[in-house]
Image (tube, rainbow, N blue to C red):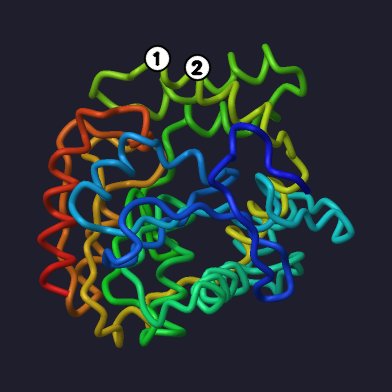
Amino acid sequence: MTASPDDRKAAFVEANGIRICFEALGDPAGEPLLLISGLGGQMINWRDAFCGGLTGRGFRVIRFDNRDVGLSTHLDGAGVPDPAAVAEAAARGEPVEVPYTLEEMAADAAGLLDALEIEAAHVMGSSMGGRIGQHLAVRRPERVRTLTSMVSHMGEPGFPPPRPEAVALLSRPAPPDREGYVAYSMELSRVLGGRLPLDEAYASAAAARAYDRAFHPDGVARQYAAFLGTGGLKEGLRRLEVPTLIVHGSDDPLISLDAAAAMAEVTPRAELLVVDGMGHAVNECPAAWPPILDAFTRHARKG
């Protein structure tokens, strides 16, 4: 794969048996901060302005495409799982066969750090990326200076389900045409946005940019299977000594605040930041950023 003009600063490394597209921003001498995207999210989903808020505070920001999305390796030979069948098997407590797990995706992140010769980094993950970050911290704590898990949970059952309108929208496949995809993405941003103002111009442009860069729904289906088929981390988090910041919105329609609070209670060195009015869409709601950036900076310095 070749980087498009939109990826002039992007580079590639071979890590954990796949090719990973990444971008490093800010002072090379700054404290390394690895950003991990959520389900189907390309590295450009970490908004440039949000990354600038981090580099402006002295961090060397590294964002990357998870496997199966963006310009990283697409594992099309693994087939396309049926998410409903995976979810039903997981709910019954049966063994689940998936192309790969979140643990393997966490190993990708560790492999990227290896390739960049970074011994340990601050790690910030959003949504599914939060769970990937948790797996990295639990399995390889020596690689994680601090962990920040945003709008995520620990993968355990027993918490309030997503709101029906969010489930209904996410259950629909994304339209294959550019115009339909952008319209679908805008509807999703509105549903997930919470009470804070949505930057609609950015959300629309970001959806178009992501479509043009790499529209790959089969990869998203495989990531979703990994999300559903990877077990929870409650016991691992009980033993985690990495300083952990848990960021959640009071109005997240997808993952309940109860799930985030339970994760904070389980994790020994955790702090919970609740952003009033924030939903699940962080990048599209800049009003949520100031408390997140301030809390993360304090957290990282403490770590």
Q: Residue 254: name its quadrant.
A: top left
Determine which residue is flagged by label 2: 204
The foreground one among 182 and 158 is 182
Q: Residue 33: name its quadrant.
A: bottom left
- Indicate which disc residue 7 carries: none
Q: Left of 225 or right of it: where is 119?
A: left
Horizontal and vertical percent for residue 101?
Answer: 64, 69
The residue located at (38%, 36%) in the rendering is: 48
Horizontal and vertical percent for residue 36?
Answer: 46, 56
- Label 1: how many Cα within 10 Å (few below 14, some 14–19, many 20+): some
The foreground one among 17 and 189 is 17
| Amino acid identity at mark 1 | Glu
Q: Are marks 2 and 1 in contact (CB under 8 Å)?
A: yes
Determine which residue is flagged by label 1: 200
Distance from the alpha carbon under mark 2 to that under mark 1: 6 Å
Horizontal and vertical percent for residue 261?
Answer: 22, 59
Q: Left of 233 or right of it: where is 12?
A: right
Horizontal and vertical percent for residue 31?
Answer: 27, 67
Above or below, comparing residue 180 to residue 185 in the picture: above
The residue located at (28%, 76%) in the rendering is: 145
- Label 2: how many Cα within 10 Å (few below 14, some 14–19, many 20+): some
| Amino acid identity at mark 2 | Ser
Q: Does dot 1 land on a helix, a strand or a loop? A: helix
Q: Does dot 2 land on a helix, a strand or a loop? A: helix
Above or below, comparing residue 87 to residue 255 in the picture: below
The foreground one among 14 and 80 is 14
Above or below, comparing residue 155 to residue 212 in the picture: below
- Quarter of the picture containing the C terminus is bottom left
The residue located at (57%, 48%) in the rendering is: 10
